[in-house]
Amino acid sequence: MNYATIKTHDTANGPGVRVSLFVSGCTHQCKGCFNPEAWDFDYGQPFTAAEEEAIIKGLEPWFMRGLSLLGGEPFEPANQAALEPLLRKVRQVYPEKTIWCYTGYDFEQDLLTGRLCDWELTQEMLSYIDVLVDGEFKLELKNPNLRFRGSANQRVIDVKKSLQGDELVLWEEAY
């Protein structure tokens, strides 16, 4: 897997200060995408153990709230195998920090059905993610006033609560 960039102090892609990994490769290719260069699976640099360690170290300070995965597309089948070990390690080292993931895939129709690739791998990734922002970006529904999402069709999902119950639960920040 390649990655486009790693932001060590991101405040736009989840609550608080976060480390954000922008992966390369996306087949959605949404019109008006803010990161079209990352559609190419070969864009950027190879994601290696050194980048994984930099992310783990970047999450160390007390004020870091967690990790955010963006793209490109983290749930592209070609990216899942590289991201699952990272998510597992973040969860092991920092169980108190949150993991957010942005995907153009639909939570119920794509991720929960196993349509993308190895269903066990997708399930494993979902088990580590706290909040998922799902749905393709739709330029005609763009709204810069929405919190943590770009278009009105996208949802901010509490993954843990949604997986525990029989219904989708939207995320609400506790103040």
Image (cartoon, rainbow, N blue to C red):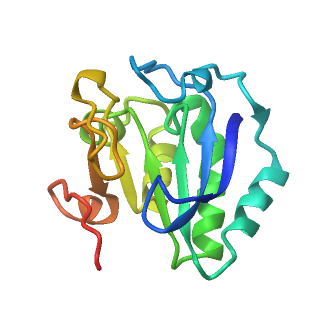
Q: Looking at this view, is 66 or 122 the one in front?
A: 66
Image point (24%, 66%), residue name: 172
Q: Quadrant of residue 89?
A: bottom right
x, y percent for residue 90: 62, 66
Quick check: 164 left or right of 119?
left
57 w.r.t. 30: above or below: below
Figure quadrant of the N terminus: top right
x, y percent for residue 59: 66, 69
Quick check: 144 left or right of 74?
left
Image point (62%, 73%), residue name: 92
Residue ranking furthest to the right: 50
Figure quadrant of the C terminus: bottom left
Residue ranking furthest to the left: 167
The tally of labels here is 0
Q: Looking at this view, is 45 or 15 the one in front?
A: 15
x, y percent for residue 157: 28, 54
Image point (33%, 58%), residue name: 159
